[in-house]
Image (tube, coloured by chain):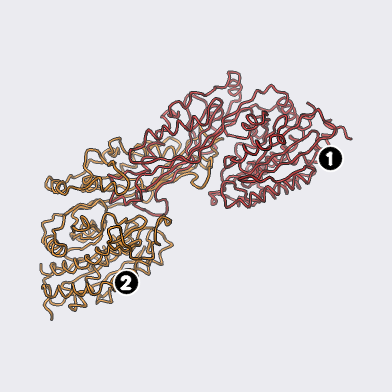
Chain colours: A orange, B red
C-alpha cells in the first residue's frame, strides 16, 4: 500500500495534472456542450444526459457512482473509499451540473453551448460557455484532482463522497428530501463546495459567510379582462400602475428596504470581521465601473463590501404586464406580475421576510384588485467559525499553490446546500472556489479562466493531501 | 334618371338590406377571416390581402376603387359620383381594415380569425371575431348601405368617396402624408366615420367629442449587462426598481396625474354639456362591474363619465424587464422598459405632454442609469359644434330607424383621423357607430351584435338619404 499525503506523492499528482491539462479541458468541453438548463422543462432530457455523463466520469477514475432519480432533475452520487487512511476525515464534495438559462441569446459572442478557448485583453486564456464557471468548470476542478490522485497514486488520500445535483439554478426543490432519504449515505465529517470565487485573479479565497435567499412571484389582477385604454382609461384600475406603485415604494431614497421589520433580525458581523474587510481596500468603483455603474444603490450608510456580504436586499428580477411586442397596443391589461428575490444575512428567517413582503403588498392593494403570491421558497444565510482545523489546512494548501495566503471572505450569493448540510446533516462546509468577479455567471458570455481551471485542480489536489493528514 | 332621396326609394333600399342580410354577413365573414394585424410585420401580407378585398368589394357595387401603396400598409380609395344631385354634399367615408393583435390567444373561446355567429345570454346574436366590431363590422355597415342603394336604386343619392386605411391600430403613420399628397382627391364637404359606439343596445348615438392620444416607450438602462443578484445585489442599481419608482410616482393617491403642468391646458366641457351628461344617469357601477372592478381609479373629484370623456389620462400599456419565463432567475437586468399612452382632451398639445413626461422621468433618473424615449407620436383631441345641419340630418335618420333620438356623446378613445380631417382637409366629421360597450374591442372574444350590423346598415341607408336632401 502506498504512503499517501506526502510531498513526493503530491508532486506526482500535480505533475499528472500538468501533463493532462489538454485532456482535462476536452472533458470539460464535453459537459459544457450539454444545455442542462434545469428551470426549463424543455431541457429535462439534457439534464438527464448531463447526470449520466457525470456518473460515467466518476466511474472512470474509480468512484462507485450512479444516477439517482428524484421528483425533479436527477442526482449523481459517487463514493471512493480510501484504503489505509481510516483516521482521515471522510468528506462530501458537492457541485451542480445544471446551468442558468442562456437568454438573451443574441448577446452571446459565441454560442453558449459550444465551448471554446478565447484570449482576453490581457492575454489570459478563457473558457467561454454557459456553465463554464457556474458550476461545471468549478466542480470539474475537483473531479480532475481526484482523477490525478487515482492515476498517479492509485487512489485518493481520504474517503470522498461526491454529490452533484441538477436543480441548483432552480431552487433545489429535490435536495432536502434527497438528503433526508439518504442521510446515512451522505453524512460525512464535513463538506467541500466549489461554487465560490477567488479574491482576485492572483489571490485565493475561502468563503466563510453566505447570504441566504428567498423568492416570491407577485401577480396582480385588476380588470377581469384586457381593456381598451380609450374606452376604459381613467376610471379603470390598471394593474401595472398598482404593481409599479408597490414596487416603487419598496426602497427608500437612502436605498434601504421599506418593508416594516425587514432589518429587525439582522446579525451584524463582528468588529474583527469588519476590520479585516476594511483592510482589503475593496475597489468599489472598479467593481461598479466594470458593469457600467458608479453610485452604490444599496443602503447609503454601509460600504459596498458590507452591502454585498452582510446586508440583506430586495431585488426585482423580472416584471411583465400588458403589451410588450412591437408597436403600440392601447390596452389596460388584466394582469401584471413581478418576480422578486431577497438576499438574507445571518439572523433572518426567510418565511418572516416573505410574510413581511406579503403584508407590504396587501396593504397597498386597491379594493378591487386581487393579489396572488406564487413560488415562494427560501433558505437562510450561513456563517462559519473559521478556527476549525479544516479551514487552516485548506488555507495552507491554497497558500502553497498560489504563493499567498487566501482571503477569508463573505459572499453575496446564496448556496442553499451549505445551509442544508448544516441543518440536515450537521456538517460545516469548506467553500473554496476559483471563479472571478468578471466571469459573467448568469449573464451572456460566461467564462472561466483557464488558470482557474488548471490551478483550481492543483489546489484541490493539495487540499485533499492536507485534509488527509488532519 | 331616378328621383332619389324620397321615402319610396329609401323603402326599396331598406327592403334590399333586409332581403340580403345573409349574403351581407357572408361578405363580412370573408374580411374577418383575414388576420390584418397592422402592428406586426409578419402580418403585412394579410394587410395587403385585406386591402385588395376592400377594393374589389367597392368595385362590385360601382365604385371606382383602387389600392394605393404607402410606406406602411396600403390605403384603399373609392369614388362613386352621383348623377343628378349636384347640390347634395359630397361626403368622405373613412374606416380601417386593420385590427389589433389577437393575443392572448388562449383566452379566445373561438379562434379570432374564424368568425362565427353565437347567442349571448339574452339570446341576441353576435358575430365573434377579432375586428368584428373594430372596425370591419362597422365599416361594412356603410359599404352594405351603399351596395343596397346601388342594387335597389341604381346608385347612391350623393357623391361618396371611401377611404379605408390599414394602420389605425398602429398609430396611422402613413395617413398624414397620404392626405397631404391626395388632398384634392379626398377633400369633401365633410367626413363620415363609423368607429364609435351606441349609447346602449337600444339607443343610437352621435359622437361629438373624442380624446386625443400620444404614446411613448421609455427604456431604462442600468448595468451594462445582466448581473447575478447574489454577486451584485445591493450596490448595483436595478433598472426595474428605477422604472417602478418612476411609474409608481406617476399618479397621486387621488388618481390625478402628477406630471407638472399635465392639466394646465385642459378645456373643460361647458355647463350645458355637463348637465346633459349628468342627465344620462350613466351606470358607473355597471360599467366598472362589467369588467370586475368597482372603484373608479381616475381623478377622484370627477364622475366616471367625465373621467372617460373629458379628462386626460396617463396609462401604462405594457412593462417588461428581467426574467419572465418559468421558474426563478436571480438576475439584475441591464434594461427595463414600459409603453405608455396619454389620452388627451381639447386644449392639450401632445408634444407638450410628452415633453412633460420626459422631464418627469429624467428628473428621477439615478446618475448612473440612462433613459431613452422611443416611438413618440400623438394627435390632439377634437370637439364639434353640433349645430351644423349634418348633425341634425343624421339625428333625424337615426331616430327614424331606432325609434328614439340619438344621444350626443363624448368618447374616451382616440380616432386620430378626425383630427387630421379637421386640421389638414378642413372638414368636420359626423361620427356615427353601432358598437356596444361590451364588444370587447382590443380584447379576446371581440364581438359585434348582429343587430348592430343589420340596423347599422339600415341607419346609413337612411343617413345617406337625409344628407342628400341637405
Q: Nearer the viewer, residue A303 or A292?
A: A292
Q: Nearer the viewer, residue B447 or A317?
A: A317
- Viewer-nearest of labels 1 and 2? 2
Q: Residues within 10 Å of mark 1 (few under 14, many from 20)?
A: some
Q: Is residue A65 visible in this depiction of the protein?
A: yes
In the picture, measured across the screen, residue B305 lies left or right of residue A218, that is right
Q: Is residue A372 visible in this depiction of the protein?
A: no
- Secondary-structure class at tag 1: helix
In the picture, measured across the screen, residue B223 lies left or right of residue B437, that is left
Residue B236 screen position, x and y as percent: 30, 45
Residue B421 screen position, x and y as percent: 65, 32
Residue B305 sits in which quadrant? top right
Mark 1 sits on what residue?
B152
Q: Residues within 10 Å of mark 2 (few under 14, many from 20)?
A: few
- Residue farthest to the top? B271
Q: Nearer the viewer, residue A467 or A104?
A: A104
Amino acid at each position: 500500500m502506498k504512503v499517501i499525503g506526502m510531498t513526493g506523492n503530491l508532486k506526482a499528482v500535480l505533475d499528472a495534472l500538468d501533463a493532462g491539462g489538454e485532456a482535462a479541458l476536452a472533458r470539460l468541453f464535453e459537459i459544457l456542450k450539454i444545455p442542462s438548463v434545469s428551470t426549463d422543462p424543455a431541457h429535462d432530457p439534457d439534464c438527464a444526459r448531463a447526470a449520466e455523463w457525470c456518473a460515467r466520469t466518476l466511474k472512470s477514475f474509480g468512484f462507485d457512482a450512479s444516477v439517482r432519480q428524484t421528483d425533479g432533475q436527477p442526482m449523481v452520487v459517487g463514493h471512493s473509499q480510501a484504503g489505509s487512511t481510516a483516521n482521515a476525515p471522510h468528506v462530501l464534495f458537492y457541485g451542480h451540473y445544471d446551468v442558468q438559462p442562456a437568454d438573451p441569446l443574441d448577446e452571446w459572442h459565441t454560442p453558449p453551448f459550444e465551448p471554446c478557448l478565447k484570449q482576453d485583453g490581457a492575454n489570459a486564456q478563457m473558457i467561454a460557455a454557459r456553465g463554464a464557471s457556474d458550476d461545471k468548470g468549478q466542480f470539474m476542478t475537483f473531479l480532475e484532482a481526484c482523477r490525478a490522485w487515482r492515476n498517479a497514486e492509485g487512489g485518493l488520500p481520504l474517503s470522498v463522497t461526491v454529490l452533484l445535483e441538477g436543480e441548483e439554478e432552480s431552487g433545489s426543490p429535490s435536495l432536502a428530501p434527497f438528503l433526508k432519504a439518504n442521510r446515512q449515505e451522505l453524512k460525512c465529517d464535513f463538506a467541500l463546495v466549489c461554487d465560490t470565487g477567488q479574491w482576485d485573479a492572483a489571490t485565493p479565497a475561502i468563503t466563510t459567510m453566505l447570504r441566504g435567499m428567498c423568492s416570491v412571484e407577485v401577480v396582480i389582477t385588476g380588470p377581469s379582462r384586457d381593456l381598451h385604454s380609450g374606452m376604459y382609461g381613467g376610471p379603470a384600475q390598471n394593474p401595472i400602475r398598482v404593481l409599479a406603485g408597490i414596487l416603487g415604494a419598496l426602497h427608500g431614497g437612502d436605498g434601504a428596504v421599506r418593508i416594516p421589520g425587514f432589518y429587525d433580525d439582522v446579525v451584524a458581523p463582528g468588529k474583527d470581521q469588519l476590520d479585516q474587510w476594511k483592510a482589503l481596500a475593496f475597489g468599489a468603483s472598479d467593481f461598479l465601473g466594470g458593469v457600467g455603474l458608479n453610485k452604490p444603490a444599496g443602503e447609503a450608510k454601509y460600504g459596498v463590501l458590507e452591502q454585498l456580504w452582510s446586508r440583506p436586499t430586495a431585488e426585482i428580477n423580472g416584471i411583465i404586464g400588458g403589451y410588450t411586442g412591437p408597436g403600440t397596443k392601447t390596452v389596460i391589461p388584466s394582469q401584471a406580475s413581478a418576480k422578486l428575490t431577497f438576499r438574507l444575512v445571518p439572523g433572518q428567517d426567510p418565511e418572516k421576510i416573505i410574510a413581511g413582503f406579503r403584508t407590504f403588498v396587501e396593504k397597498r392593494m386597491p379594493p378591487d384588485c386581487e393579489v396572488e403570491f406564487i413560488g415562494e421558497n427560501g433558505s437562510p444565510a450561513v456563517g462559519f467559525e473559521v478556527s476549525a482545523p479544516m479551514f487552516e489546512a485548506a488555507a495552507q494548501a491554497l497558500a502553497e499553490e498560489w504563493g499567498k495566503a487566501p482571503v477569508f471572505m463573505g459572499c453575496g450569493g446564496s448556496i442553499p446546500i451549505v445551509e442544508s448540510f448544516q441543518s440536515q446533516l450537521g456538517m460545516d462546509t469548506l467553500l473554496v472556489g476559483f471563479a472571478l468577479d468578471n466571469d459573467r455567471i448568469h449573464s451572456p458570455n460566461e467564462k472561466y479562466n483557464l488558470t482557474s481551471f488548471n490551478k483550481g485542480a492543483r489546489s484541490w489536489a493539495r487540499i485533499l493531501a492536507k485534509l488527509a493528514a488532519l
